[in-house]
Image (tube, rainbow, N blue to C red):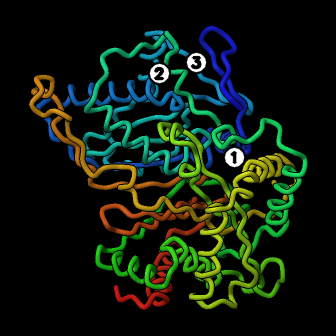
C-alpha cells in the first residue's frame, strides 16, 4: 500500500482497511444525504492575531500558509476514487484553482455553523472567519485522524511564521512527502498471512455479532438525517486538576474514568428491555488507539495521515458494575491492547480490514444501528499544538508588515454526524478538560445530550470523590 506514479502528474495507492471503512461511510452518507459525508473531521481554533498588516494582507498570509502546507503535507489535497487514494501534481493554474476551492474567507460569526451545515467538500478545506477570529478545518476522516489534525494545525501555524518563497509545484517534489498507509509504516507484509486475516475477522466479527449493545433511547435508523450538532462540557481548571490527581492516585487514566462514566450514563438512559436481554445488555464498542508512538521516528513528519487503529471492547452487563470496577476493567484494555503487545500491533491491519469488509455487506446495513457514541481521546492538546506562535526572528525586516503573534485561545474538535454513529471526544486544552458530544439532531434531542453530559460529570466526580 505504497504510493506509485501512474502518469506524469498522478500518484496512487490502495487504501487500507480503516481508510476503506471511512470511505464506505462517507460515500454512503453522501449518496443518501445531499452530499454530506459522515465522520467529516471538524476542528476550530479561536485565535488572536497580532499584526502590523492590513486585513487583506493577513488573509493573503493565511492563504499562502495553506498553500505551503499542501507542499509540506500533500495528503490534504488527496482525493479518493473507489478505494484508492489519488494525488495529482498541480501546475500554477491548478494550485490557484485548488486554493480558491479550499481556502475560504467566511463572514459567519461562529465556525460551528459551518460544521452544522456540512457542505460537501472534495478535499480538506480551511475557513478563515475574521469576524469571529476563528480558523476552521474540515477534512474527510479517510485522509486524517484526530491527533493528526492537531499536528496539522501546528504545521500550519508554523508555516505561517516561516514562509517558504520557493515552493516548486509542478516538479512533483511534494509527492515524496505523501504518507504511506499505516500498514506500511508498521512494516506489515503486503499480503497478510491467512491465520492473521482469520484472527482479525474473528476478533472484529465477535463484536459485530453482538452489536448493537446497550445504548440510550433515540431515533437512530427510524427518521431521515438532520443537521449535525456538537454539545460540549468544559470543566474548570480546578476540577480538571482534581480529576487528574484522583486518577493518578488510583492508578488509572483519565480516559478510562470518563469512558466508564459514559458507559454508566448510557446504561442509566437505556431502554429497560435492553437490560433484560442477554445480548443487548452488553456494552459493545471499538476503542481508538493512536499508533504514532509505535512508528519509526521518520514517520513523525506526517500529520495528515490515518495513523490510529480500532480495537473491540465488550463488557458483559455493565449495569452490574460499580464505577471503580468498570474503570479498572476499561483501563486495563487501554493499557494492554497495544503497549508492549507486538501481537496485537501485527493484527491491527487485519482487524481494520475486517471492519471494512463487514461494512460493505448488505447484512451490516440491514442490522439495527448502534445507538451509543464511540469514545475517542485526544489527550493533552499542547503535546502537539502550542498555545502561541511568533516569528523565529521578530527583528527580521520581513516581519515589519507581517503577523507578529498568533495566540490559540481555544481548540475544538469533533466530527460531523450524518449517519447514526455519534462521537464522544475527550481532550485537555489550557488545563481544562473538554468533552465534546457530536450527534445528529434528527436522532437525538439536544436536551437529552446535555443530560448525558451532566450525568457523566456527576458519575465521574462522585466516583472519583472529587468536589467541583
Q: Is residue 31 left or right of residue 89?
A: right
Instruction: Say above or below: 371 vs 65.
Output: below
Residue highlighted by disc 1: 18
Residue highlighted by disc 3: 88
Q: Residue at x 36, y 75 (%)?
A: 240
Residue highlighted by disc 2: 98
Q: Tell me which numbered mark, 2 or 1, is placed earlier along the sequence.
A: 1
The secondary structure type at the circle numbered 2 is: helix
Q: Nearer the viewer, residue 77 or 398?
A: 398
Q: Is residue 148 left or right of residue 163?
A: right
The secondary structure type at the circle numbered 3 is: strand
Q: Residue at x 50, y 37 (%)?
A: 302
Binning the other alpha carbons within 10 Å of mark 3 as few (below 14), some (14 to 19) or many (20 upward) gives many
Q: CA distance from mark 3 to mark 2?
A: 11 Å
Q: Nearer the viewer, residue 159 or 444?
A: 159
Q: Quadrant of the N terminus?
A: top right
Q: Tell me which numbered mark, 3 or 2, is placed earlier along the sequence.
A: 3
Q: CA distance from mark 3 to mark 1?
A: 23 Å
Based on the displayed image, in which of its 4 quarters is residue 274 positioned? bottom right
Q: CA distance from mark 2 to mark 1?
A: 27 Å
Amino acid at each position: 500500500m505504497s504510493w506509485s506514479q501512474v502518469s506524469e502528474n498522478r500518484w496512487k495507492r490502495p487504501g487500507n482497511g480503516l481508510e476503506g471503512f471511512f470511505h464506505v461511510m462517507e460515500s454512503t452518507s453522501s449518496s443518501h444525504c445531499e452530499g454530506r459525508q459522515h465522520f467529516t473531521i471538524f476542528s476550530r481554533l479561536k485565535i488572536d492575531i497580532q499584526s502590523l498588516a492590513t486585513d487583506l494582507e493577513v488573509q493573503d498570509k493565511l492563504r499562502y500558509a495553506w498553500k505551503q502546507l499542501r507542499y509540506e503535507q500533500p495528503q490534504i489535497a488527496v482525493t479518493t476514487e473507489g478505494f484508492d487514494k489519488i494525488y495529482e501534481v498541480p501546475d500554477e493554474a491548478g494550485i490557484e484553482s485548488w486554493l480558491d476551492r479550499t481556502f475560504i474567507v467566511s463572514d459567519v460569526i461562529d465556525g460551528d455553523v459551518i460544521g452544522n451545515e456540512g457542505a460537501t467538500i472534495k478535499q480538506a478545506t480551511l475557513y478563515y472567519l475574521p469576524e469571529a477570529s476563528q480558523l476552521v478545518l474540515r477534512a474527510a476522516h479517510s485522509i486524517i485522524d484526530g491527533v493528526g489534525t492537531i499536528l496539522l494545525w501546528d504545521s500550519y501555524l508554523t508555516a505561517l511564521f516561516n514562509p517558504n518563497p520557493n515552493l516548486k509545484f509542478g516538479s512533483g517534489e511534494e509527492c515524496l512527502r505523501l504518507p504511506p498507509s499505516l500498514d506500511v509504516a508498521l512494516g506489515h507484509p503486503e499480503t497478510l498471512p491467512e491465520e492473521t486475516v482469520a484472527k482479525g475477522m474473528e476478533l472484529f466479527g465477535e463484536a459485530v455479532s453482538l452489536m448493537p449493545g446497550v445504548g440510550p433511547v433515540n431515533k437512530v435508523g427510524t427518521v431521515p438525517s438532520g443537521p449535525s450538532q456538537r454539545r460540549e462540557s468544559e470543566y474548570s481548571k480546578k476540577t480538571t486538576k482534581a480529576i487528574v490527581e484522583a486518577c493518578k492516585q488510583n492508578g488509572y487514566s483519565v480516559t478510562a474514568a470518563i469512558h466508564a462514566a459514559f458507559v454508566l450514563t448510557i446504561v442509566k438512559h437505556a431502554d429497560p428491555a435492553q437490560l433484560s436481554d442477554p445480548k443487548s445488555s452488553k456494552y459493545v464498542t471499538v476503542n481508538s488507539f493512536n499508533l504514532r508512538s509505535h512508528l519509526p521516528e521518520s514517520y513523525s513528519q506526517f500529520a495528515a495521515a490515518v495513523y490510529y487503529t480500532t480495537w473491540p471492547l465488550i463488557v458483559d452487563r455493565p449495569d452490574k458494575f460499580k464505577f471503580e470496577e468498570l474503570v479498572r476493567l476499561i483501563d486495563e484494555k487501554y493499557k494492554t491492547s497495544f503497549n508492549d503487545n507486538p501481537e496485537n500491533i501485527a493484527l491491527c491491519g487485519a482487524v481494520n480490514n475486517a471492519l471494512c469488509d463487514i461494512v460493505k455487506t448488505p447484512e451490516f446495513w440491514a442490522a439495527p444501528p448502534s445507538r451509543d457514541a464511540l469514545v475517542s481521546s485526544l489527550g493533552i492538546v499542547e503535546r502537539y499544538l502550542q498555545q502561541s506562535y511568533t516569528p523565529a526572528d521578530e527583528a527580521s525586516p520581513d516581519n515589519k508588515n507581517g503577523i507578529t503573534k498568533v495566540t490559540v485561545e481555544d481548540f475544538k474538535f469533533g466530527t460531523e454526524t450524518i449517519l447514526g454513529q455519534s462521537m464522544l471526544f475527550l481532550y485537555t486544552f489550557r488545563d481544562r478538560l473538554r468533552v465534546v458530544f457530536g450527534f445528529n439532531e434528527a436522532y437525538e434531542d439536544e436536551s437529552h445530550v446535555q443530560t448525558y453530559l451532566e450525568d457523566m460529570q456527576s458519575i465521574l466526580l462522585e466516583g472519583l470523590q472529587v468536589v467541583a
